[in-house]
């Protein structure tokens, strides 16, 4: 291979790695897995600082040491731990929402439409494009019916709220 071809191949591989890392940054499960070691480390640090502060305060209470020596601040470590807990909670909530949407999507559109980019992965359960279009048209029709029903209800509510004129 020529040097230009090797450079192009290296450039393509680098772009693919960047895309993969960007996808992993947005993946809540991957982010959760990345946060767990940080959370463990933060908890260990928090417990270590709590133990040091407790030992320091005990020695001050017993009159062994004066309060001149500085100790690490417990509140900063606790705040860091809570911040990581909040991030983990957000990742789990986002993962749950993604799963819920995926389940709802599979329930309301259970069959796949074969794509032109991957013709070799056509499944026996997939529907034809015309079947897919008819399903989408029925969903649009249903959405319009719901919209019209809501409009009628809002007009009725608005009409009842207005005072009647003297006849």
Image (cartoon, rainbow, N blue to C red):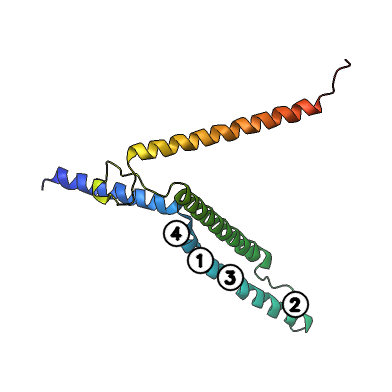
Q: Which residue is mark 4?
A: 30
Asked whether residue 115 is in view, the answer is yes
Q: For marks 3 and 4, give the CA distance.
A: 20 Å
Sequence-wise first label, 3 or 2: 3
Which picture quadrant has residue 160? top right
Circle 1 or circle 2, nearest the eye: 1
Residue 33 percent across, percent down from the top left: 47, 63
Q: For marks 3 and 2, give the CA distance.
A: 28 Å
Q: For marks 1 and 3, give the CA distance.
A: 10 Å
Crowding around mark 2 (Cα neighbors within 10 Å: few <14, some 14 to 19, many 20+) is few
Residue 91 percent across, percent down from the top left: 53, 57
Marking on residue 36: 1
Sequence-wise first label, 4 or 1: 4
Where is 159 relative to 146, above or below? above
Sequence-wise first label, 3 or 4: 4
Mark 1: secondary structure:
helix
134 relative position to 123: left or right: right
Report the residue at 14% width, 46% height from top.
3
Q: For marks 1 and 2, give the CA distance.
A: 38 Å
Mark 4: secondary structure:
helix
Q: Residue furthest right?
A: 166
Circle 2 or circle 4, nearest the eye: 4
Residue 115 percent across, percent down from the top left: 30, 43
Q: Which residue is mark 2?
A: 66
């Amino acid at each position: 291979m020529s040097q230009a071809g090797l450079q192009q191949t290296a450039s393509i591989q680098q772009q693919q790695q960047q895309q993969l890392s960007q996808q992993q940054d947005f993946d809540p499960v991957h982010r959760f897995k990345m946060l767990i070691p940080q959370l463990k480390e933060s908890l260990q640090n928090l417990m270590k600082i709590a133990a040091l502060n407790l030992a320091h305060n005990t020695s001050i209470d017993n009159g062994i040491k004066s309060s001149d020596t500085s100790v690490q601040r417990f509140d900063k470590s606790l705040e860091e731990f809570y911040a990581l807990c909040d991030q983990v909670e957000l990742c789990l909530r986002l993962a749950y929402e993604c799963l819920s949407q995926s389940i709802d999507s599979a329930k309301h559109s259970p069959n796949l439409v074969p794509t032109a980019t991957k013709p070799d992965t056509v499944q026996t359960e997939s529907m034809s494009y015309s079947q897919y279009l008819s399903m989408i048209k029925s969903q649009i029709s249903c959405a319009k019916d719901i919209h019209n029903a809501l409009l009628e209800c809002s007009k009725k509510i608005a009409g009842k709220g207005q005072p009647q004129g003297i006849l």
